[in-house]
C-alpha cells in the first residue's frame, strides 16, 4: 500500500487536541455573525494570513482572541461537532480532548455552558459517528495556582465527566512546579494528569512534570531529548509523549520537520504518538500530521502502524476497549 492509503485506513486515537484550536475561521465567522460580534479579521484570507507564528505566545494571542466569539452552549456544541466530523473522516476512533474553561469563564461565559455544549456533542459523536471520547480539563499556566484551585472547585459537579486534567498555555516562566499542590489534589481526586512540558520549556520542566508531579502523559516533551536520564525514565515507565508535528513546525519549535524528534523517540522505544494540537491554526488534522512527518522522516509502514497502535496504548481507555482497536 502507498503511504497515504495506509494512513487513511489506520484506526487512530487522538490524544492531544485543544477543542478551541479546532475552530476553523469559516465557523468562527458564522458564529460571530449570529452572536453579533466583530471578529478581529474581516475575511477568511485575513484570518489565515494572520496564522503565521514565530513562537507559542504569538499563537496563543490569536487563539484566545478567536475563541472569544463562543458564547452559547450551541456554539460549543457546533465547535466540537465540527471537529468530530473531521476526525471521523480521518478514521479517528477515539479522542481525548482538552478544553480551556478559564479562557471562557474569564469572559463571563458560565462553566456549564462550555462543558454542556462540548459534552453533548461528544455524546452525539459516539452515537452517530462511533467515536468514543474522554475530556481533559486544562488549567491555564499563565494564571495562578489559586485560579486553578478556583476552577477545580467551580467544576465540581462535572468532575465525574472528566478523565483528567491538563496544563497548557504559555510555558516559559510557568513551570509545572508552580502547580504542584493543585496537581497533587487532582491526583487525589482520581484525575489522570497530562501536562504540556518541553514544548518550548527546558528539560527541567519535563523533569518536574514527570518525576515531581507524576504525570500520566507528557504533552509535546520535545526537549526531553536533551536529557538522557529523562529518556531512560520515559522508556522504562512507558509514559506517553503526545507529539504534534505540524504544531512544532508552525510554532518554530523546530525549523523543519526533518528536525522532529519523533523517529528518534520511536527508535528509542518511547511511547510516542502523533496528534494535531490546534489543527485549525497549524494546517492539518491528524492524517495530515502522519503524512507530513512520515514524508519528512521517511517513516516505514511498520513505524506508521506502530504510531497508530501507540495512540491506543497511550489512551485512557479500558484494556477491553483498547483490545478492540489494537
Ligand atoms: N494551548 C493550545 N495549544 C497549545 C500549545 N501547543 N501549547 C501550549 N498551550 C496550548
Ligand atoms: Zn497542546
Image (tube, rainbow, N blue to C red):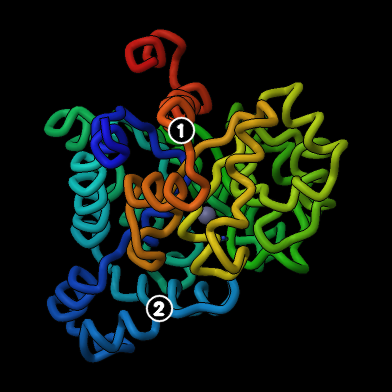
- Rate crowding at label 1 as few (under 14), some (14 to 19) or many (20 or more) other CA atoms within 10 Å: few
Disc 2 residue lies near ligand 1 with CB under 8 A: no
Query: Measured from the top left, where is residue 36 in percent x and y?
Result: 18, 84
Q: Quadrant of the C terminus?
A: top left
Helix, strand or loop under label 1: loop
> Residue 277 is drawn in which quadrant?
bottom left
Q: Which residue is mark 1?
A: 300
Q: Residue at x 25, y 88 (%)?
A: 38
3, above or below 66, in the image: above
Looking at the image, is mark 2 or mark 1 nearer the viewer?
A: 1
Q: What is the quadrant of residue 135 in the picture?
A: top left
Q: Residue 143: horizontal and vertical position, in percent?
A: 65, 66
> What numbered label is drawn on residue 51?
2
The tag earlier along the polypeptide, 2 or 1, is 2
Image spot of residue 309 (x, y percent): 44, 23
Q: Is residue 246 left or right of residue 195?
A: left
Amino acid at each position: 500500500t502507498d503511504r497515504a492509503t495506509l494512513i487513511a485506513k489506520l484506526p487512530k486515537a487522538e490524544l492531544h487536541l485543544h477543542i478551541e484550536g479546532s475552530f476553523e475561521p469559516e465557523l468562527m465567522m458564522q458564529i460571530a455573525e449570529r452572536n453579533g460580534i466583530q471578529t478581529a479579521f474581516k475575511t477568511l484570507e485575513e484570518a489565515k494570513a494572520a496564522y503565521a507564528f514565530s513562537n507559542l505566545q504569538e499563537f496563543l494571542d490569536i487563539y484566545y482572541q478567536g475563541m472569544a466569539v463562543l458564547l452559547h452552549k450551541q456554539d460549543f456544541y457546533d465547535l466540537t461537532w465540527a471537529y468530530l466530523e473531521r476526525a471521523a473522516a480521518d478514521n479517528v476512533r477515539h479522542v481525548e480532548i482538552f478544553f480551556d474553561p478559564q479562557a471562557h469563564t474569564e469572559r463571563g461565559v458560565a462553566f456549564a455552558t462550555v462543558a454542556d455544549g462540548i459534552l453533548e456533542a461528544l455524546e452525539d459523536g459516539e452515537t452517530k459517528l462511533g467515536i468514543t471520547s474522554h475530556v481533559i480539563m486544562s488549567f491555564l499556566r499563565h494564571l495562578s495556582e489559586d485560579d486553578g484551585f478556583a476552577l477545580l472547585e467551580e467544576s465540581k459537579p462535572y468532575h465525574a465527566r472528566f478523565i483528567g486534567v491538563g496544563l497548557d498555555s504559555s510555558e516559559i516562566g510557568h513551570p509545572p512546579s508552580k502547580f504542584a499542590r493543585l496537581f497533587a489534589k487532582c491526583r487525589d481526586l482520581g484525575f489522570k494528569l497530562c501536562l504540556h512540558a518541553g514544548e518550548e520549556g527546558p528539560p527541567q520542566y519535563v523533569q518536574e512534570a514527570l518525576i515531581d508531579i507524576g504525570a500520566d502523559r507528557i504533552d509535546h516533551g520535545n526537549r526531553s531529548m536533551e536529557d538522557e536520564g529523562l529518556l531512560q525514565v520515559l522508556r522504562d515507565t512507558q509514559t506517553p509523549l503526545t507529539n504534534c508535528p505540524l504544531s512544532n513546525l508552525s510554532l518554530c519549535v523546530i525549523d523543519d520537520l526533518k528536525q522532529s524528534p519523533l523517529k528518534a523517540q520511536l527508535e528509542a522505544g518511547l511511547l510516542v504518538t502523533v496528534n494535531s494540537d490546534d489543527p485549525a491554526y497549524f494546517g492539518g488534522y491528524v492524517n495530515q500530521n502522519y503524512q507530513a512527518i512520515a514524508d519528512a522522516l521517511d517513516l516505514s509502514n511498520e513505524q506508521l502502524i506502530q504510531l497508530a497502535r501507540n495512540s491506543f496504548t497511550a489512551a485512557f481507555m479500558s484494556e477491553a476497549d483498547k483490545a478492540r482497536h489494537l
